[in-house]
């Protein structure tokens, strides 16, 4: 009897051993903790579209069709990769971050072989899960914009999500920390360069040209990155910082004097927490800076997995009221007048009760600005220099991170683009200040484009297109389909959306600028 | 499910012990060999995970493999069948949109895996041992483990990179109906149709991104075999 069972036993045991067999491997995970090291190699390709499919997908929505019209018909397909890399936080601590690498593909000559790299820095995001690489997310409009404008026209795009976002191990975001953010841009670039040869798109290679650009916060980061490159003995082929708060001390001074920008209640917690982590002296407790209404939990509020709408509705932040509408009284008539609620419909939105920032903190900041004024705000002086060295901790932090700092000027062609009526990142205080600061640069090195200016020069068509789009939007908002708004209401909506509306026009201008090099 | 299987096995054991004791004189051994024709009626949840479009599913092609079984006749009417086969390779194809972006998906072979899938069945055989045709029905337990799991080039393109696949092993109930044809006391022909419950949790790891699906393979097998008894 037993002999009949023996063969069966052997076969079954063989089967069980075989069942332990392995699968095909996935990407390797690097244990190298050096900043700039690529963590997962090869990286995940999130999506792959050929030129025709990308055009069709963009054309399927109204906003996509408008983008297509502005950016032009895609010449190349695009492979979207998700890269993970090592970097450092605002306090020089080791951390990880992620980002996008968009690679042009296709048979056209502009889509493979050696292609230029565009290193792109995105604008302020409050969503903790922000991932510019995730082109499957229809809310990722900035990712679609840079893909359509750059990648689909033959540029390899590298765009970090920034430390503190997506699956970064950093618990906060080093917002407008010039050293950290520029360092992270170069870390993302190094990781992308390491990843590119191992992708599905290895027919496209780094052609050696490097363009640096970004919008809003990203405009600031782009300019800081050019400075960091030059400090390291390298340079960008050209750069195009767009609508960024470059002159951060002048900009913050203007806000504390009462010219409160749209979005200030969102930017403030990000900025305070970033500098608190980096320098440790912005406050002893959040309630030193923030009013009791909002202080609890504000140090960990942003970025958040909650939507901004939810944050406002849960009363975790005020919508626009940065300062107390009962302004400080010092007995100094001129100072009291400077601190009073401005007689301006936009800036006055920044005052109210409840409010975000305590009067005491505001006053300490402004007293420092009075004692050691910025060269651009409130009264421009020759050369628009920085303050000597502020003593108030927040003002010292924005002084440190003002991009006039470092005794430098761009060594490669630079386009600064923005819109003169920007209510979020003031054009004259930032772009205008940097233009004045670099007024002695050789001709041709610095180009300034105001998309709201009188159309002239190589960007006249874009300026005309922007102004036409504003006029069309104003008219549309007053139609039944647009909500039947009054003229004043429609104008208010345009103001609210202005900063975002400028972005695609400046981005296309940047591409046109880069094409010359 | 586990409770049901445990109950089934317990019931089989009790039944076996009682009938074997009652009719020990009928003990006989049979080896069968033949062909499995396997079809899969896959029901799967959509593949889900971060950065994964909705509506991605999977289907599996039918296949064939060698059927081998050892059958122990316990009584005149009860057989204990240990069925196994040369582990077949199943090929999984994408089911859903024609393309993901511009990457072909629907109908593209995305992965393969080998199945080690032994089954034990207690069959009730009708009619007398000398009858020319003897129908039978059976119930039992199937255990399936998956190995040599491969993501194909097409699968890697869909997933976005080299992909590691894991499939949890499955233990489930199995049932069969069949018919034997008697040439003589030693040789028989068999035809049977079987169904078994095989479920598995799929995990696909592409560059650290995990996508999952729960699969109910619902295999249906038709077997043609010859058996030698002694």
Image (cartoon, rainbow, N blue to C red):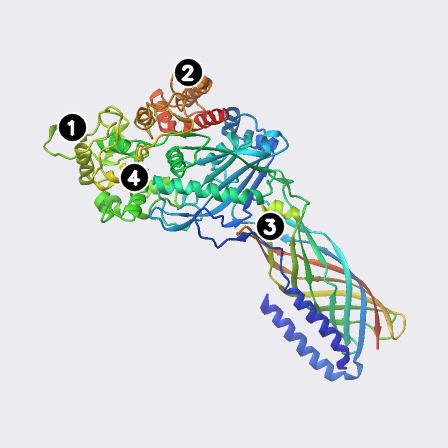
Q: Name the residue under label 3.
A: B162
* Separation of residues labelled 2 and 1 (CA atoms): 38 Å
Residue A502 location (% of width, % of height): 41, 26
Report the side of B103 relative to B184 (left or right).
left
- Helix, strand or loop at disc 2? loop
Q: Name the residue under label 2.
A: A455
Q: Is residue A272 above or below residue B42?
A: above
Q: Mark 1 points at which residue?
A: A337
* Separation of residues labelled 3 and 4 (CA atoms): 43 Å
- Helix, strand or loop at disc 3? loop
Residue B217 location (% of width, % of height): 66, 57
Q: Is residue A356 visible?
A: no
Mark 4 touches mark 2? (CB < 8 Å) = no
Q: Earlier in the sequence, mark 4 or mark 2?
A: 4
Mark 3 touches mark 1? (CB < 8 Å) = no
**Between marks 4 and 2 in the image, the one whose residue lies nearer the viewer:** 2
Q: The disc numbered 1 marks a residue on which chain? A: A
Q: How crowded is mark 2: few (under 14 residues within 10 Å), some or many (20 or more)?
A: some
**Between marks 3 and 1 in the image, the one whose residue lies nearer the viewer:** 3
Report the side of A464 relative to B112 (left or right).
left
Q: Name the residue under label 4.
A: A268
Q: The disc numbered 2 marks a residue on which chain? A: A
Q: Is residue B44 above or below residue A302?
A: below
* Separation of residues labelled 4 and 2 (CA atoms): 35 Å
């Amino acid at each position: 009897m037993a002999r009949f069972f023996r063969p069966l036993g052997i076969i079954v045991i063989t089967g069980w051993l075989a069942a332990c067999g392995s699968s095909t491997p996935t990407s390797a995970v690097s244990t190298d903790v050096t900043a700039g090291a690529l963590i997962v190699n090869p990286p995940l390709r999130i999506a792959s579209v050929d030129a025709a499919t990308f055009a069709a997908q963009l054309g399927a929505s109204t906003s996509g069709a408008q983008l297509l019209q502005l950016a032009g018909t895609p010449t190349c397909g695009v492979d979207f990769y998700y890269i993970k890399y090592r970097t450092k936080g605002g306090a020089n601590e080791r951390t990880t971050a992620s980002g996008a690498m968009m690679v042009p593909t296709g048979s056209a000559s502009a889509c493979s072989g050696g292609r230029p790299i565009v290193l792109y820095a995105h604008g302020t995001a409050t969503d903790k899960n922000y991932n510019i690489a995730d082109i499957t997310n229809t809310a990722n409009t900035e990712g679609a914009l840079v893909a359509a404008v750059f990648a689909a026209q033959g540029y390899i795009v590298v765009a970090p999500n920034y430390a503190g976002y997506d699956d970064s191990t950093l618990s906060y975001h080093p917002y407008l920390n010039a050293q950290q953010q520029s360092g992270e841009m170069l870390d993302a670039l190094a990781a992308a360069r390491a990843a590119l040869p191992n992708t599905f798109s290895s027919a496209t290679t780094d052609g050696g040209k490097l363009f640096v650009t970004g919008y809003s916060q990203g405009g600031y980061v782009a300019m800081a990155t050019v400075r960091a490159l030059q400090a390291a003995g390298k340079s960008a082929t050209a750069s195009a910082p767009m609508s960024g708060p470059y002159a951060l001390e002048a900009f913050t001074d203007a806000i504390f004097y009462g010219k409160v920008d749209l979005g200030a209640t969102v930017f403030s917690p990000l900025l305070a927490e970033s500098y608190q982590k980096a320098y440790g002296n912005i406050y002893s407790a959040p309630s030193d800076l923030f009013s009791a209404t909002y202080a609890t939990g504000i140090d960990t509020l942003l970025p958040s997995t909650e939507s901004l709408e939810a944050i406002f509705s849960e009363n975790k932040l005020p919508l626009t009221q940065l300062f107390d509408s009962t302004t400080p009284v010092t007995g100094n008539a001129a100072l009291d007048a400077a601190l009073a609620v401005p007689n301006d419909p936009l800036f006055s939105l920044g005052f109210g009760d409840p409010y975000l920032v305590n009067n005491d903190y505001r006053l300490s900041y402004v007293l420092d600005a009075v004692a050691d004024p910025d060269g651009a705000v409130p009264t421009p002086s020759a050369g628009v220099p920085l303050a000597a060295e502020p003593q108030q901790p927040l003002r010292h932090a924005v002084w440190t991170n003002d991009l006039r700092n470092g005794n430098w000027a761009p060594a490669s062609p630079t386009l600064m683009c923005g819109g003169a009526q920007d209510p979020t990142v003031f054009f004259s205080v930032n772009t205008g200040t940097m233009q004045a600061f670099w007024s002695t640069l050789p001709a041709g090195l610095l180009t300034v484009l105001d998309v709201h200016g009188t159309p002239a020069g190589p960007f006249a068509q874009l300026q005309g297109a922007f102004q036409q789009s504003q006029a069309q939007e104003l008219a549309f908002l007053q139609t039944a389909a647009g909500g039947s708004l009054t003229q004043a209401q429609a104008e208010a909506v345009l103001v609210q959306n202005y900063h975002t509306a400028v972005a695609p026009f400046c981005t296309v201008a940047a591409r046109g600028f880069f094409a010359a090099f | 499910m586990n409770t049901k299987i445990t109950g089934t096995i317990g019931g089989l054991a009790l039944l076996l012990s009682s009938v074997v004791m009652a009719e020990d004189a009928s003990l006989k051994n049979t080896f069968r060999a033949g062909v499995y024709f396997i079809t899969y009626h896959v029901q799967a949840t959509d593949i889900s995970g971060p950065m994964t479009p909705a509506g991605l599913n999977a289907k599996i092609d039918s296949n064939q493999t060698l059927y081998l079984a050892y059958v122990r006749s316990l009584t005149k009417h009860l057989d204990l069948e240990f069925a196994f086969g040369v582990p077949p390779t199943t090929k999984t194809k994408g089911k859903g949109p024609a393309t993901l972006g511009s990457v072909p998906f629907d109908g593209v072979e995305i992965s393969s895996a080998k199945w080690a899938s032994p089954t034990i069945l207690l069959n009730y055989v009708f009619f007398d041992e000398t009858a020319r045709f003897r129908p039978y029905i059976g119930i039992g337990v199937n255990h399936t483990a998956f190995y040599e799991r491969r993501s194909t080039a097409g699968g890697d393109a869909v997933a976005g990179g080299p992909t590691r696949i894991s499939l949890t092993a499955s233990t489930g109930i199995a049932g069969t109906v069949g018919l034997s044809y008697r040439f003589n006391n030693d040789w028989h022909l068999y035809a049977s149709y079987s169904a078994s419950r095989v479920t598995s949790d799929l995990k696909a790891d592409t560059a650290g991104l995990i996508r999952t699906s729960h699969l109910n393979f619902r295999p249906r097998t038709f077997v043609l075999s010859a058996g030698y008894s002694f």
